[in-house]
Amino acid sequence: MRRVIAVEKIVEQIINARKIAIAGHIRPDGDCIGSCTALYQYLKRNQNRFGFEKVDMYLEPFSNEFRILNATDEASHNCQVDEIYDLFISLDCASVDRLGNAIKYFNSARKTLNIDHHISNTNFADVNHVVADASSTSEVVFTLLEEEEITKEIASSLYVGIIHDTGVFKHSNTTEKTMNIAGKLISKGIDSSRLINDTFYAKTYIQNQVLGRCLMESDLILDGKIIVSSINRKTMELYQAATTDLEGIVDQLRVTKGVEVAIFMYETNENEFKISMRSNGKVNVSKIAIHFGGGGHVQAAGCTMNGLPTDILNNLTPHIEAQLNGNVKP
């Protein structure tokens, strides 16, 4: 999917607005946080030029490592205030339900704008700018901004967004354009090494404990083509772990030799699990996630499913096996 509009049309929406809201998806990751804080800073910097009254940013609570980014402390973590915005900008959301509680502002806004890169995006806003071949929403946002208006702080946010969705440039969504953009961001004087280490690689003791537990209890199925691991709420409580402490587990599972698909599940409510899937190329996990009400990318996707982990796995496995056997096109 590629639903791209002219930059001028996006600017038109901003100029015609007095009150603007920015929001990312539930359980925000690096790209979500990076793209939101980058656009927020850009709009604040250019408020007089565009002439709007105010801009607010809504993000669910996120991991402390992202506090290294400017403007993260200006994000509202709840949507209790009643406000009607002239323009609501959704970033990194493939569908409207991914906005979580911020959907109330989307529904009441006079105009809505959707900026994203997910191939599964449903074009749910009044104006949609979806670039499915971009590495990240942060890359998309970069292409919308004047380079001279990108400060060191904005560049840091965009860089973090890009490195998180590309796995520090190792995933197949990394293109020549992605690397060129990363180079331009580095030229702004950002501390790229620190941003990579502090937000991507550095782990707390609890995060390492949970990662070790999930790796130790993982299973290989389908002749070693699938690796799966899960964690329930009781175990998370034992480690005093939050859902933000689970990031990166599925990616570590994926690098197991011989594996084509990695599946990681964690319990969100009783017998309700958030499913994360990663593919090494032969399986389109986005297609599977969409089938079960989720979405994502060809090699990285997710959904929410009900049941015991064994039941969920029994539902997922036939779809993966069908693609591996060539019965269904990836």
Image: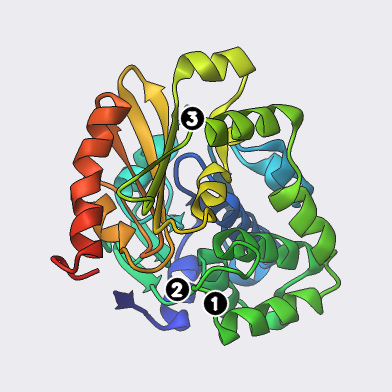
**Looking at the image, is 24 positioned above or below residue 282?**
above
Label 2 SS: helix
Q: Position of residue 160 (x, y in %)?
A: 67, 60
Question: Circle 3 is placed at which residue position?
Answer: 81
Label 1 SS: helix
Badge 1 amino acid: Leu
Do the numbered discs 2 and 1 sit on residues whose CB atoms are within 8 Å?
A: yes
Do the numbered discs 2 and 3 sit on residues whose CB atoms are within 8 Å?
A: no
In the image, what residue occupies the spot 54% across and 53% down? 32
**Looking at the image, is 212 positioned above or below residue 137?**
above
In the image, what residue occupies the spot 75% across and 29% down? 205
Q: Position of residue 107 (x, y in %)?
A: 30, 45
Q: Position of residue 198 (x, y in %)?
A: 78, 49
Question: Circle 1 is placed at which residue position?
Answer: 144
Give the CA separation, mark 2 to mark 3: 26 Å
* Mark 1 or 3, nearer chain start: 3
Badge 3 amino acid: Val
Question: Circle 2 is placed at which residue position?
Answer: 10
Q: Residues within 10 Å of mark 3 (few under 14, many from 20)?
A: few
Q: Is residue 64 visible?
A: yes
Give the CA separation, mark 2 to mark 1: 9 Å
From the viewer's perspective, is the residue at label 2 or at label 1 nearer?
Answer: 1
- Is residue 44 toward the left or the right of residue 264 in the image? right
Classify residue 152 by image quadrant. bottom right
Classify residue 90 by image quadrant. bottom left
